Amino acid sequence: MDISQLVFYTFAGLAVASSVLMITRRNPVYSVMYLVLTLFSVAAIFVLLEAHFLAALQVVVYAGAILVLFLFVIMLLNLGHEFDPDIRGKFWWVVGFGLGLVLFAELFVLARSVPEAPESDLLARLLADQGAVGMVAEPLFENYVIAVEVTGVLLLVAMVGSVVIAKRKV
Amino acid sequence: MFFESLVVSAVLFAVGVAGVLLRRNAIVMFMCIELMLNAVNLSFVAISRYVGIEGQLFVIFVMTVAAAEAAVGLAIIISIFRHYESVDVRNFRLLRW
Amino acid sequence: MVGATLIDLVLPLAQEAAEAHEPGFVPFLPSWIVLLPFLGFVMNGAVAYLAPERRRLVSVVGPGVLGLAFVIAAVNLVLIARVHDAEPVIRSYWTWIEVGHLRIDAALQLDQLSIIMALVVTCVSFIIHVYSVGYMGEDPGYARYFAYLNLFVFFMLVLVLGASFPLMFIGWEGVGLCSYLLIGFWFRESAKADAGQKAFIVNRIGDFGFLMAMFATFAYLGTLDFQGVFEAAPRAFEYGGAAVTLITLFLFLGCTGKSAQIPLYVWLPDAMHGPTPVSALIHAATMVTAGVYLVARAGVLFALAPLSMNVVAVIGGATALFAGTIAVQQFDIKRVVAYSTISQLGYMFLAVGVGAYTAGIFHLGTHAFFKALLFMASGAVIHAMHHSLEHAGEPAGEDVTQDMRNMGALKRYMPTTFKTAWIGALALAGVFPLAGFFSKDEIIWSVGARGQTVLWVVAIITAMLTAGYITRWLVMTFHGENRTGEQARKHLHEAAPIMVGALVVLAIGSVVTGWVNVPEALPLLPEFTWLHHFLHPSFAQAEHIIVEHLGEAAHASPIGGGEGMWALISTAAAIVVILLVFNALSGKKYLPVREAKEPTGIWGLLYHKYYVDELYDLAIVRPFKWICTFSWRVIDQGLIDGVMVNGVGYTTRFGGWVISRFQTGYLGTYVLIIVLGVLIMLGAVMLQG
């Protein structure tokens, strides 16, 4: 077992553990914190999978921006303390984890059926040639430039929409 | 590490689903959805090692949409909270027979 | 309206400029002949809606527009009569329908036939409108009545002047509509409303024939304009071929409906429930003659189909005899005249059926006058009866006021009506020198000259029947003893001056109109076949085809003798019959209707009109009602409403109710359902792969 595998298992374990903790904590603030931890771990796995730029994005956008937004809303709505007991009863524990398990089993079988890909240094070569940002940026702004623009519009619409929705009635 | 990544992705996704079923707090349910999105992202990244850079590009779009969704979703939650003074989904029962 | 006038005024100028050296027939404001009655309808209709009590305005507008239309028609008659063999003038105002090869203009055809028809229509309707001013004067629906009447004349003129089959059909349907509206004018009484519906429904059967004929004509010839059809027909159709026979038989089916011939005549006697001037105008003088006009107008088509010609003639002859016999034993003053109308219409069809178009149109014109006269005399009598019974405080329903058994000796109380009625009756009976003599004699002669011996005999018998029943009508109404009862008798009086005036004018018309066509064969009289020569261009083509295939008409009757001799014989026979019947009946005592017994034996058969209405009821109406009831109860209410419509509704509602139970409103439920769905789909993928 080489060092990268060790790192992978470490972060994989961390991600799974903190995600389970996230859904079981009563306090939403804790949940957010465990989610942040999960996302960091996933970011670390991204690095191991030679997606350096995405790892950075994961940290900056998800952990940095989106989860701060969540945290901000929780604080704003004053849900940090005096929170309702929002975890359901035993029946739902069984249902939730049961269905989760079934889902995992199905996904596992499906993942196994994916043919083991040959070891490839496709991304490693790209990484060496163009650098972590370049290898993502070049196809993004060449082949998918229209999609990028449309996504930009989507963000604008989301921004305007959220302002309109969240604003108090005029 | 390819297969293992897929397994981790599956676990995270299943946990996200279980969380949505388990919780009644709209914000936490929302966070579970984010978790599921992230699990999918992980699969994309893993597969992109063998298929090509497109997998990673897809992840970028997913993140963008997730960000937009988070903004709008949280706005809706705020507006609902104003109305019910709560984010418990049991309160939102207008859409029924 | 302005546009049509402009076309009428400017077009002749342009044409004159183009062909200055050949002055043809230039019609004078033809669009106004049609537009004036429509204008009257609009104005009277507005009055009926807005201010029904403005009777004076209605009294001026209603007859006034027709007076003007009559003047214009008369001017046009003079104009066209001055031109020898004038070509028909087509005045097109706008394109009405243009679809593919079908192009129909809103166009009027001005030729000898249409103008003489327009003249008869406007003249008779003008007089009847004037009469109506007196007759309907006290009716609360006065303005509505005149609106309908004007609308009727408008449609009748469209029918007569229209230059194509579809335009004629518009008029054809329009007069049917007005007939329905006017028969059921007093629609609060269900018998009258029912009579209107009967007329309308029976006419639908005929209209079906007209429509089929139009479709077939268009399919074969690709045009529906009269000019185009009659030019193309001789080339397109083989003489006596199936196509043209079919078309003409369908056309004739339309005629039997509109003109009350066997087997569709049953509506006309019931149509007598309408106001009497309506019976005079629509159900005697104008609308019912539309079928004769149609056969004459489509003479070229009929001439090409000898079978159809024979059908027309036989049906006409049969109807004449059949209705004539029924008229003998009717007691309702209007029904006698109504059956007489059916019988006379049979004469007209007999004439056009043997190719004597001029004779048919001639009888149409003279009949319009004397039959309107007889109806309006009946109207005056009914009016007087109604008033006297009302004043005497006795029941004055239709069954009482119109039954001749309640009348008698009215000549003492209504001298002018009595005299004019005699003139009308003699004209109808065909006594020299009144109008009916010339026209009926010409028909009988034409039938004989064509070698139709059986029909010729039928026509002569019917002529004698006619003289008989109309004499009976006169005797029962005006002669003998008075049977109205003591009280009512005191109130009997002559009709209003305006009504009497109309009667007198019509009586004059009944005398003089016959003189426009005096056959050459009559001794002691100058030959004056003006109408024959005048109408010749309209019928030349059809007559040419007939002569080409059947040869010239003979110059002697089937059993010898010339036209002049037979004219004398027939008028002598009519006079003899009149005298016999008069002598036989004037001594006879009739019982008032409440004491009278129903006739029995052969008289009962005639009294009950051969039970044709009952037969139709049994053979057609009741089975149809059964089918309708079955479709209504079982198919419509049970199957369609119950199983299909409501069944689908209930199923959907039940299904919706079941599914709606899943819509709990709880987010958890939805999430659970979504997750289950995803699991199932993933499972399916898993099992496949």
Image (spheres, coloured by chain):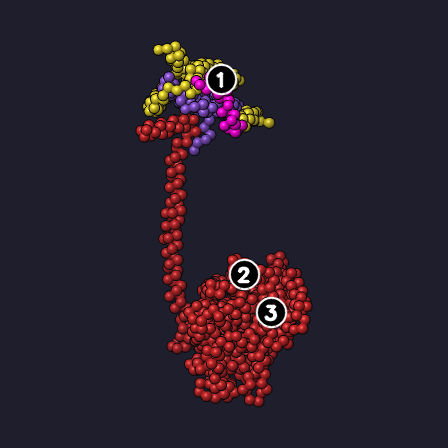
Chain colours: A yellow, B purple, C red
Secondary structure state at the residue bearing disc 3: strand
Q: Check residue C147 for magenta coloring.
A: no
Q: Residue at x 37, y 10 (%)?
A: A2
Secondary structure state at the residue bearing disc 2: strand
- Label drawn at residue C103: 2
User: Is disc 2 in contact with disc 3, using a CB cutoff of under 8 Å?
Assistant: no
- Could you confirm whether marks 3 and 1 are on the same chain? no
- Looking at the image, tell me whether mark 2 or mark 3 is earlier in sequence order: 3
Q: Is residue C61 left or right of residue A72?
A: right
| Rendered view: A83 above or below C516 | above
Residue extent of the magenta highlight? A124-151
Residue A23 lies, in percent from the top left, at 41, 17
Q: Is residue C70 left or right of residue A165?
A: right
Residue A92 lies, in percent from the top left, at 37, 21
Q: In terms of depth relative to the viewer, which is nearer, C279 or C296? A: C296
| Mark 2 to mark 1 CA distance (whole Å) | 79 Å
Secondary structure state at the residue bearing disc 1: helix
Residue C195 visible in the current orientation: no
Q: Quadrant of the C terminus of chain C?
A: top left
What subunit carries mark 1?
A: A
- Label drawn at residue A131: 1
Spot the residue most to the left.
Answer: C687
Residue, disc 3: C89
- Could you confirm whether marks 2 and 3 are on the same chain? yes
| Mark 2 to mark 3 CA distance (whole Å) | 18 Å
Q: Residue at x 40, y 71 (%)?
A: C611
